[in-house]
Image (cartoon, grey):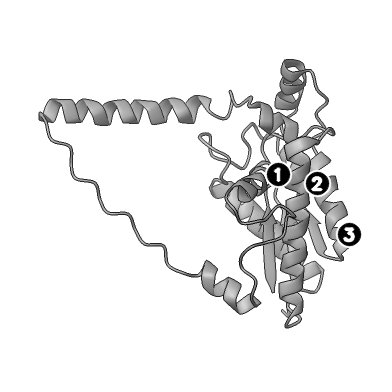
Amino acid sequence: MVVLFYLNYNDVHDNINSINDGYLNANLEFTYPTGSKKEVFNEVRKPIQPEPNPVSASGLYVFRLASKGLRSFTLFLQASLNMKLDFRTYLAKTYSPDHSGELKKGYTVASKAIERFKHLTNQDSTKFLLVQLPDPFQLDPNWVEAAEYKYDMAIVPDHPNKIIEGICNDLNVSYFNMYPAAKKYIEDNDMKFPYFSHTCDRHPNELGHRYLATEIHSYLKNNNYLNY
């Protein structure tokens, strides 16, 4: 079985980058890999070579200590402010019903990628499920209201979910939308932003990993993906 996780902002914008990086041609066809599922998995499993350790900076100890202290202070500020002050235009546009231009191209690439995964998994009848993970911004009514005011655009929190669900339905791909359950869990437990994520970025924290694992396991079991 293959479970593909989809993140609203990251994946649609990374898809645009994949065009610029040459992974797709002008017709939005994948330039690599063109082989079997085994070839794809072997490529993914290749170990990443660690970068060589940089040579320690020379200089007086006090200056090196000050540099480390400044770095620590910068990370502290990021952890304190990054999530709360994240009003990037392209983040807001992800949740706008008007997804023309580059964003429309990103969803086209998403459709091509999901279709590619379906083709690969069909080669040996592997089960394929796409799970759309909840994003802390779409779960936060305060961010939605502030983004609408700042950019003078409509923000529909579950708009990306409807697009991806439509793509999966067209391709006959199993789809699990985690947004409704996550929103209910947050409201029932009176959770505060950023909910399941770290304060410094949108990666899941310990509670987030536990919640996601529990919900996905329940979905797999209730839909007969598991044999126990």
Badge 2 element: helix
**Is the N terminus in the top left, top right, bottom left or bottom right quadrant?**
bottom right
Q: In the image, what residue type sits under mark 3?
A: Asn
Q: How many marks?
A: 3
Q: Earlier in the sequence, mark 1 or mark 3?
A: 1
Label 3 sits on residue? 169
What is the x, y in percent for residue 126? Answer: 73, 78
Q: Residues within 10 Å of mark 2 (few under 14, many from 20)?
A: many
**Is the C terminus in the top left, top right, bottom left or bottom right quadrant?**
bottom right
Residue for point 54% across, 45% down: 205
**Observer able to see residue 162:** yes
In the displayed structure, 3 sits above or below 7; it is below
Mark 3–mark 2 CB contact (< 8 Å):
no
Q: Earlier in the sequence, mark 3 or mark 2?
A: 2
Residue for point 54% across, 39% down: 198
Of residues 207 and 125, the one nearer the viewer is 125
**Observer able to see residue 127:** no
Q: Quadrant of residue 222?
A: bottom right
In the displayed structure, 89 sits above or below 29; it is above
Q: In the image, what residue type sits under mark 2?
A: Asn
Badge 1 element: helix
Q: CA distance from mark 3 to mark 2?
A: 12 Å
Rendered image: mark on residue 8: 1
What is the x, y in percent for residue 116? Answer: 73, 66
Rendered image: mark on residue 181: none
In the displayed structure, 29 sits above or below 156; it is below
Label 2 sits on residue? 161
